[in-house]
Structures are given as structure tokens and as C-alpha cells.
Amino acid sequence: MSAPATQPDRIRNVALIAHDGAGKSLLTEAMLFDARAIPSFSRLTGNSNAVVDTEPEEIKRNFTLASAVYHLPWNGHLVNLVDTPGYANFLPDVRNALQAVDAAFVLVSAVSGVKRETERLWQLADELEIPRIVFVNRVDEDRASFLRAVDDLEKSFQIKPIAVQMPLGEEAAMRGVIDLVEMRAHAYPEDYTGKVEVKDVPPELRAEAERLRQLLVDEVAAADDVLTERYLNGETLSAEDLYAGLREAILTRKFVPVLCGSAYRNIGARELLDFATRALPDPAARTHVKITTPDGEPAGVRPEPGEPLAAFVFKTSVDPFAGRVSAARVVSGVLKHDSTVYNPVRRARERIGKLFKFEGKSLVPAEEAVAGDLVAIPKLQETLTGDTLCDEKHPLVVEGFHEPKRLIAYAIRPKDRRDEEKVIASINRLIEEDPTLALTRDAQTKEVLLQGLGQVHLEVAVERLKRKYDVEVELLEPKVPYKETIRGRARVQGKHKKQSGGRGQYGDVWLEIEPLPRGGGFEFENRIFGGVVPKQYVPAVEKGVVEAMESGLLAGYPVVDVKVALVDGSYHSVDSSEMAFKIAGSIGFKKGLQEANPVLLEPIMNLEVTVPEEFMGAVIGDLNARRGRILGVDPMARGQRIRAQVPMAEVLRYAPDLRALTGGAGVFTMEPSHYEEVPTHLAVKVVEEARRQQAEAKA
């Protein structure tokens, strides 16, 4: 049976965001169950992960690793829910999900309050201008406090949180929620069924409920000029007035409504859905999305069904058997099955055979998707995450996606050498699903590197590689691409003479070698006068030098930042050749390296670490211990940004180390800067290890 089309004003697109373990997936499941979109609730069956977090990697770790889309009917509306990961390694996936929705539910624990990861997600929602409401979860647990959680919201997010609900009891006595808009108590049985009984507010809680409701009314009235005037004239604001004011406040982010409940006991999920359909913005309010022409000019297209088609892909899934499935947000126009669309990013036409609505890992057929809806499109050939689909006659691009900076890289090695080509092909399939992964080959070390956002990110990728494509690889710490250079100067002779019957070989050159400034690379100068080395042999001399630079004398690393001048030499009219002068150039350069005081160079990284104030001293101390050089500290809205330069060898495992040092509160970016000389005592160890590995390879 096909899912019916829904008009934009009846659609609500919401992402659930919070740190891992906050209860997002269980709340998603409770809402689906209450809407009868799924037949059972895992708390009733005793089968955890029955509907959400079904991937083996998610079950193993017991938290969400990738965003998943669900749809459900509620109060005559279509609600598209996107359950997102909370672990920092998967932040770009959350960003993509937020760009596909119009609002967010932010989950906060009534026991532990706001976690660092949630602060980071809140900041991301700020950057994307996403309206949001807060759901205080776990109000039924020991040491839970709804009001303490509300205070924590104000301190952590620098916002004005306003309760629109309060718990009907707290800790073990919590048995429902009190709706402060309607001033009614919603009581739940202890059977996890989500059935609710609406009744009067208990006398012992009425005073506190009236206090909180007055705060709510005051803030709602102040958020809307019309309501302010009516309120000041002594009018009583109705429930519909309050919801209208709440909707305006959410959209303009004047304050943040706070609801509460227990996802574990299926308390509050119904009220959350009610609130979403009555107070959250519909897709037409999503005016901050930029739609441009392929040239980057504003297109002037509104988020309405009557406008030209523009749909962007915010997620891609690849099944080894079923193929690629693209999750898309229709921003404007109508996307229909059995149609042809255009991808202006890839300059390719795509055939839309069938459309589907998401039910987590399952799909339900759909005839079309109007502006504002989320839809699944199978078997697109060229389109990847971040691409736009449109009408070829009206090419449009939805802006907003960005390439994340990958923070960690490991060398990969197939456990079976025969799988090398299969490994590359399989990882490229993974990258279609997860563009935050990248596969590169280090030209110097010859290693294949898998880059990602953290240790867990790469470990999950390797597990998926085995499960989906039956390929096993090892993650190895990458080799540091050291280089060699010289400090001094040398004037040397390189002579190649060989006579063994018949035509011999003769090449004779004198070279002057000197260092260049760091980053200078290589220069070759021909200073020959009088033809002592014929012109046709000079390029061969340079080629011999360049080939010799590929392997230095200290540890076999490439040689850089040198200038070589050909200043003298001799030749034989019969025995000289390009090969002979090439060999002579190589001999001379290697001899010159020995005499010019060779030294080892290491790559230095530019590192930016953002941490809360209380961790700044510990992070700076740790960077100093890693031979880092602090360049400056800049104040940020929620902490400090430390700028430093650190040797690459000291930060190969910085992601897990920073997480351990800051409790997950620190984030960083890193990129190559330049090369510097390795301290002598460390250079000795690097050279010894390189020579040991070379000896083992020869053996």
C-alpha cells in the first residue's frame, strides 16, 4: 500500500539530537508505537533495539551510529522523525540530518543535565538556525530533578528555557506530565502502553503548576506584539493563543519550550507529538535554505509545491544486494515516481523509478513527495550525498553542505593480500554511504590511508567492510613521512668510468651542493662553460641527482630543500653517454650528502583545539609535552580556541587522547603546515628504527 501524499502545511520534520545514551532511539520508538506506526514497543516485548539501532555495529555498542528516518501519522499530520547519532565522531551525519528538517527535539537528562556532546550539537543547530524544543528525559529515575535540568539549560546554552510541562511527580513517584497550557494532568499506567488518562491537576501540585504557567504566559505574551497588547489590556489568553505565541517564539528562537517525560516508560511521547503538530514550524517556514542557480545566483524559489523542483540528498545508504538508496528532502516543487530529473552537480540525468517513505530500515511505496517531505529514492546512478535533483529546464542547487575536515588516518592492510583490489572497491562503496570517510595513498610511504573523524568512526567502517563485503583489513598506525636535508655545503666529484671491452662508459661531473630555505624544494643550475660537459648530457646529470634524492643517506627518506650546481666535468668523445652522466650525477650527489651535514626533517601540523575554559590548562600542558608550540589562545562563545603547531609524530592518536583528557568536551582540526628539523636525540631513534625495518625487509 502506498503512503498518501501530504500537503506541506501538514508536514513536520524533526530531528532528535543529544549525546549518545540520552534516549533518542527509545523515544523515537515510543512515538512510533503510540502512533501505531509499529506494532510493538521494545519495553513491552523485552527485545531491545527491536525497531531502531538494528545494525550489528549499533547493537554491539548500544548507541546510534547513523541517522535513520521514520514517518508516522499524528493528528492529521505527517511527522518525519530523524533519529541521529550522539557520538562526536558522527557529527557531520547530524549536520546533514539537521539540514533536512525544520526543527529539533533536544534530549537532556533530568539526572545528569546537559552533557558536553549536547552542547556541541546545540551549537551546530545554532549555526544552521534550526528551531528547537527540549525534552527532559528520565524524570522518573533516582536523583532526577526537572527544575534543576531547566536551570542547567539556561547556564549551558545561554538561553531562556520556559516549561510548557512539568512532571506529575518526580523520581519513582513520577506517573505522567502536567500540561501547563491546558492545565490538565496526563497520567500513565505502569504498563508502557502509552495509554493516558487526562484529569485535573492534583491539589498538592497545583501551586507549582500555576507558578510555572504564569511564567509561560508572560513569556508567550511578550513574544508577540498582538498578544502583548491583549494581555496588557487584561484579556485571558486561550490555549490556541498560547500555541500561536509558542510557534512564533520557537521560530524566532526568543525562548525554548521545555517538555518532559520518560522514554523508557513511554511517558510523554504522545504529548511531544501533540506539541510538535501544534507549535513546530511547517516546511514553508524554512526560509533560510539557499536555493541558487548552478552559477551561484539566488534563484528566488520558494518552498512551495507550485515552484520548480529542487530536492537535495542528505543521506546515502548502500546495500550490497539492493544497491544505493538516497534519502532526499524536497525543498520546492513536487518529486514524482516514473520521472526523469537532473543533477546539476554531476551534470547527469537520473531516472526516478519508484519513490518510498522511510520506516527506518524498511520502505513503503509513495506516489510523490511534495515540498517539505522526506523521501527515499532507490538506485540513483550518479547522485551522492549533498547533490541536488531538479528539473533540467530549471536547474537549481540547494546550498549548505560542506566537506568535513578528517581528523584521523590509519594505514589499512588486507589480511589476505589477494584482496587488495577488492578492499579498495569495497571502501569506495562505503564512502558513497559515508562521505566523511576518505581513501588516499601516501606518495612517499606508499601506504593506503583510510581517513575519518575518529577512532570509533574508522573501527565501525572496518566492521561494516567485513559484514557487507566480506573483506577484512587491519588498521595500522601510519608511517610518519620524514624527509632529509642538509645543513652545510659541499663541492664533490661524481665520476663513472667503466671499460670492459668494446665501448666503455664515461661520465665526470663536479657538483656544488648547498641548502635551500625550508620549503625551497629543489633547484638545479648549469654553470658549465666551454663545453667540458656537452649540453646534451646536462639533463641526464640533473635526472641522476633527482633520482638520488628519492632516498637519503640517513634513513632512506626523500631529500628536500637543496640546490645543486653543475660546475665542471669532463667527457670522452666515444665512451660518454646520457646514462654515464646520469650515474655520475647520482654518485656525486650521494657523496655530497655525506659531506654536507645531513639532517632529518619531520612534518609539523597546524592544530586548533576548542575546549571549555576549565580544560585549557590541561590541554596546553599536554601540547607542550608533545613538543608543541602554542601560537595563541582565542576566546570563543563556549570556551577557548588554542592554536598550536605540533610534530605529526606526536599527534597520530590525538583524537582519543583529547577525548580522554577533556571528557569528550574538546574538539580539534588539524592540517599540514611545514617541515622542521628533528631534535638530535629523537632523530637517532628514528634513523635506527628505519634502518632496522629496511634490514628486515631485505631479509
Image (tube, rainbow, N blue to C red):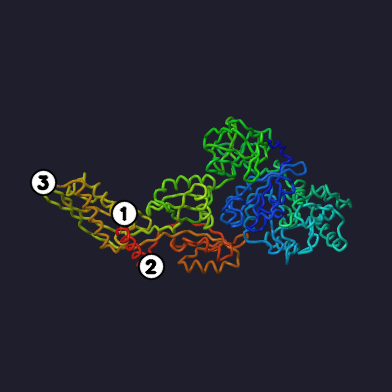
Q: CA distance from mark 1 to mark 3?
A: 33 Å
The label nearer to you, 3 versus 2, is 3
Residue position for label 2 = 682
Q: CA distance from mark 2 to mark 1?
A: 22 Å
| First in sequence: mark 3 vs mark 2 | 3
Task: List x then y, in percent, for residue 298.
Answer: 61, 38
Label 2 secondary element: helix
Q: Amino acid at mark 2?
A: Leu
Q: Amino acid at mark 3?
A: Gly
Tell me which residue sits at (61%, 50%) in the image.
54
Q: Choose the circle earlier in sequence order: 2 or 1.
A: 1
Q: Which circle marks residue 550 in the picture? A: 1
Residue furthest to the front in view is 45
**Is residue 247 visible from the viewing direction of this image?**
no
Mark 2 closeness class: few <14, some 14–19, many ≥20 residues within 10 Å: few
- The label number, if any, that marks residue 152 in the structure image: none
Where is residue 330, by image quadrant? top right
